[in-house]
């Protein structure tokens, strides 16, 4: 089987893929990056015509024409919205899978870190340090414990479940929102011993239509849903108006799942205590955005899953190799994307 890979793998990663099934022919096609989005380059290698599988991060222009034998696209990322912008998956019936689960443990650590820096006043301490001020009483006044706090998780997939497991160790009460709250288990890929595959951690489950109630009950709100037509601007002025004045919001999904103007208003007016944003609209964030200078905002730069590149691809290749074996043997794949739902 010929596989086109748009990421240069290490020898170890390549061997992981090649050991999955006999006769793997892994090629690195020549790619031309022109102006515009890095997600949509052009493949200029005719060898792709014989490939049945595309492995990587990108959705090359004209892929349907240059690769008529293509049957499956596997993304090293969890986000798939850039691939679903074209009709290739629906029109050709090409299977699309992602690497959801391979980044979840690291993003979960980021979320807990964001909660800890807020509840222990780190941002205020850093500001005082830069100004050479010993702000003992001021920092003490904002400190609180995570124990007994309620974490509302919007999007109870691999990231939400990995976060819930860590939150449980801190004595945090977990509330979970998902498209169908009657289905608690998660069939997606996850590291052994990680996450909440059976859905046993949340104290209460919510549907998308109950998001105002989830926000009302939460001290911390985590946004971790896929970006779809249904989740675009999922939280806005109506939801923020229901929040506790001490509520702290963390977004590791996509900037567009929040009405960003409404978020800025809520932060500046005190309807939210603060926010940690790993994603924004747009990215990079515009230089004149008020978010840069809003005191109760912590900005990171789409780095919540960051770790050494080798370890990222090692795990992603393990998932792909397992799926490759399943693909050839006709078994159900992990992390198959429904192009209609968008995840």
Image (tube, rainbow, N blue to C red):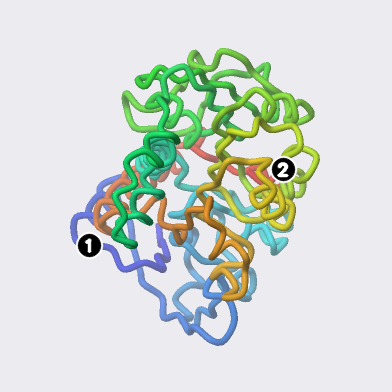
Q: Which mark is residue 297?
A: none
Q: Secondary structure at mark 1?
A: loop
Q: Is residue 296 visible?
A: yes
Residue at image location 31% in from the left, 68% down from the top = 8
Q: Secondary structure at mark 2?
A: loop
Residue at image location 27% in from the left, 53% down from the top = 18
Q: Check disc 1 and report the residue beneath it.
A: 10
Percent of width and height locating residue 30: 41, 81
Per the model, the C-alpha gap separating discs 2 and 1 is 41 Å
Residue at image location 65% in from the left, 29% down from the top = 178
Q: Is residue 322 visible?
A: no
Percent of width and height locating residue 64: 63, 69
Instruction: Report the number of numbered marks.
Output: 2
Q: Check disc 2 and report the residue beneath it.
A: 235
Percent of width and height locating residue 165: 40, 24
Residue at image location 45% in from the left, 20% down from the top = 172
Q: Is residue 60 above or below residue 181?
A: below
């Amino acid at each position: 089987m010929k596989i086109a890979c748009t990421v240069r793998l290490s020898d170890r990663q390549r061997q992981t893929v090649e050991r999955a099934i006999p006769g793997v022919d892994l090629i690195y096609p020549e790619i031309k990056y022109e102006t515009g989005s890095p997600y949509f380059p052009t493949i200029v290698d005719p060898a792709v015509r014989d490939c049945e599988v595309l492995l990587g991060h990108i959705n090359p222009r004209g892929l349907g024409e240059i690769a008529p034998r293509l049957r499956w696209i596997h993304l090293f990322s969890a986000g798939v919205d850039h691939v679903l912008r074209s009709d290739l998956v629906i029109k050709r019936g090409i299977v699309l899978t992602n690497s959801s689960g391979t980044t979840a443990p690291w993003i979960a650590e980021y979320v807990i870190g964001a909660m800890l820096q807020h509840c222990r006043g780190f941002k205020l301490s850093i500001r005082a340090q830069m100004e050479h001020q010993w702000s003992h009483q001021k920092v003490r006044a904002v400190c609180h414990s995570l124990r007994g706090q309620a974490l509302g998780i919007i999007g109870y997939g691999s990231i939400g479940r990995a976060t819930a497991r860590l939150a449980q160790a801190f004595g945090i009460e977990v509330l979970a929102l998902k498209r169908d709250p009657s289905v608690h288990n998660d069939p997606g890929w996850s590291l052994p011993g990680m996450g909440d595959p059976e859905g046993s951690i949340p104290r209460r489950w919510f549907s998308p239509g109950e998001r105002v109630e989830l926000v009302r009950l939460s001290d911390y709100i985590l946004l971790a849903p896929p970006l779809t037509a249904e989740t675009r601007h999922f939280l806005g002025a109506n939801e923020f108006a229901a929040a506790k004045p001490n509520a702290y919001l963390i977004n590791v999904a996509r900037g567009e799942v929040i009405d960003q103007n409404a978020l800025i208003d809520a932060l500046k007016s005190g309807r939210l205590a603060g926010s940690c944003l790993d994603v924004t609209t747009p990215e990079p964030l515009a230089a004149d955005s008020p978010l840069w200078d809003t005191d109760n905002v912590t900005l990171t730069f789409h780095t919540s899953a960051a770790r050494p590149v080798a370890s990222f691809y090692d795990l992603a290749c393990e998932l792909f190799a397992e799926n490759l074996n399943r693909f050839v043997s006709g078994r159900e794949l992990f992390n198959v994307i429904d192009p209609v739902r968008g995840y």
